[in-house]
Amino acid sequence: MNALRDQESDDDRTLKPEWLVVLGIPISNTGEYNGWFCPCHGSHYDTSGRIRKGPAPLNLEIPPYKFTEEANILIG
């Protein structure tokens, strides 16, 4: 965790560890950390959307959301 630029644990970033909801352009399952990659500025994020490499100063934004059912999410 100390190596992260914007330190947030998985528990801080998600309601359920198997789900990650983010806003923005990043493409999933890519980049050096097999998480997210933004082709606009070249930043690499891990699978929890935390910045790992590149010019982005912060982790990927997580919008407000809640689970309405076990496998359904309401975003916003």
Image (tube, rainbow, N blue to C red):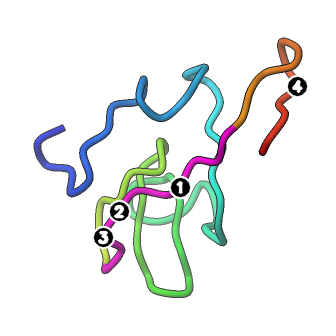
- The alpha-carbon separation of the residues under discs 1 and 2 comes to 8 Å
Q: Which residue has dot 3 on it?
A: 57
Measured as percent of width and height from the top left, residue 35 is found at: 50, 52
Q: Is residue 61 left or right of residue 12?
A: right
- The alpha-carbon separation of the residues under discs 1 and 3 comes to 12 Å
Identify which amino acid the numbered label 4 is placed on.
Answer: Asn
Identify which amino acid the numbered label 3 is placed on.
Answer: Pro
Measured as percent of width and height from the top left, residue 27 is found at: 64, 66
Element type at marker 3?
loop
Q: Nearer the viewer, residue 7 or 53?
A: 7
Label 2–label 3 contact, CB within 8 A: yes
Identify which amino acid the numbered label 1 is placed on.
Answer: Glu
- The alpha-carbon separation of the residues under discs 1 and 4 comes to 20 Å
**Residue under the point 47% across and 65% down:** 31
Label 1–label 2 contact, CB within 8 A: yes
Q: Residues within 10 Å of mark 4 (few under 14, many from 20)?
A: few
- The alpha-carbon separation of the residues under discs 2 and 4 comes to 27 Å
- For residue 47, the mark is none
Q: Is residue 39 left or right of residue 56?
A: right
Quadrant of the snapshot with the C terminus:
top right
Would residue 75 be counted in the magenta stretch? no
Q: Which residue has dot 1 on it?
A: 61
Which residue occupies the extreme left position in the image? 2
Q: Quadrant of residue 10?
A: top left
Q: Is residue 47 left or right of residue 28?
A: left
- The alpha-carbon separation of the residues under discs 3 and 4 comes to 31 Å
- For residue 58, the mark is 2
Q: Which residues are magenta?
A: 55-64
Measured as percent of width and height from the top left, residue 43 is found at: 41, 74
Sequence-earlier tag: 3 or 4: 3
Q: Residues within 10 Å of mark 2 (few under 14, many from 20)?
A: some
